[in-house]
Image: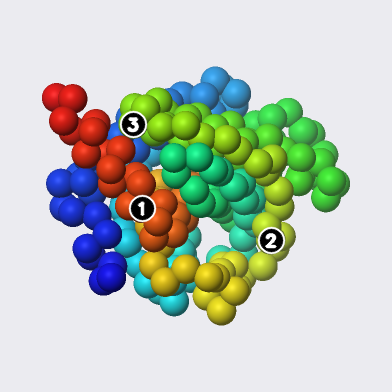
Amino acid sequence: MSAPALLSQDQTDALQEVTNIAMGQAGSSLANILGVFVNLSVPRIRVLDVVAIGAAISDMVGPDKEITAARQSFHGTMRGEALVIYDQEGCMDLADLMGYEEQLEASAERELILDVSNVLVGACLGGIADLLEATLTYSAPSIMAERIPVDRLIDPKKMTWNYALLVEVNFTLEERNFTSHLTFLMPEESIQSMGEAIDKFMESF
């Protein structure tokens, strides 16, 4: 099955709108925690061959960036992994906003990253699931990588999928250097299940 055939253009457009609504909920949750205005990019949705995912994420984050990333699996009507990617300078700004006056110890930085990641993933995926009347369960978030070059984050040789749905949104904070990138990766069968849920969603209008 070719990658473009996994979602039609109408399904992609509907998913972008659903994701945009859910991302707004996630941004609002983050703004409430940090007490600062959160800017969101327009969701970008692509079905990619797995060998192209690493390069796509590098382009999203920016080349030669050192990043830390958290991952959180989800199951149910949709299955896949959510990644929240942070650049190191942004981690420092995040700590400042959360009231840490001194440099974070590694364990405290991990805890902070996991807490924020859990909020973003839960609010966004939960919003998508509600709109599509889908059921989801989540694993606990975990640190996927720490202080590594972004181009080392994804190893396509370790992925068992042929294609994956890449949904990406960038969060930035007003008057801060903080940027985080929220990405969902879903395998072929999950993309097809999502397509069916999107069709039902479109039929309701």
Note whether 121 is above or below 88 in the view shown: above
Q: Quadrant of residue 131?
A: top left
Using the numbered discs, state the Cα–Cα distance from disc 3 to disc 1 in whole angstroms: 13 Å
User: Mark 2: which amino acid?
Assistant: Ala
Query: Mark 2 highlights which residue?
Result: 145
Q: Position of residue 143 (x, y in %)?
A: 71, 52
Q: Position of residue 41 (x, y in %)?
A: 35, 43
Q: Is residue 112 visible?
A: yes
Point 16% across, 30% down: residue: 203
Instruction: Say which residue appears at 33% left-offset and 52% top-offset.
Output: 192
Contact between marks 3 and 2 (CB within 8 A): the answer is no
Question: In the rendered structure, which amino acid carries the disc numbered 3?
Answer: Leu
Which element carries disc 2, helix, strand or loop?
Answer: strand
Give residue 132's mark.
3
Relative image position of residue 126 (x, y in whole percent): 47, 30
SS at circle 1: helix
Gap between marks 3 and 2, in whole Å? 31 Å
Give whichever of 40, 138 is nearer the camera.
Answer: 138
Quarter of the image containing the C terminus? top left
Instruction: Name the residue at 37% across, 27% down.
Output: 133
The amino acid on which the numbered mark 1 sits, given as a three-letter code, is Ile
Q: Is residue 64 visible?
A: no
Q: Earlier in the sequence, mark 3 or mark 1?
A: 3
List the residue tagged with mark 1.
191
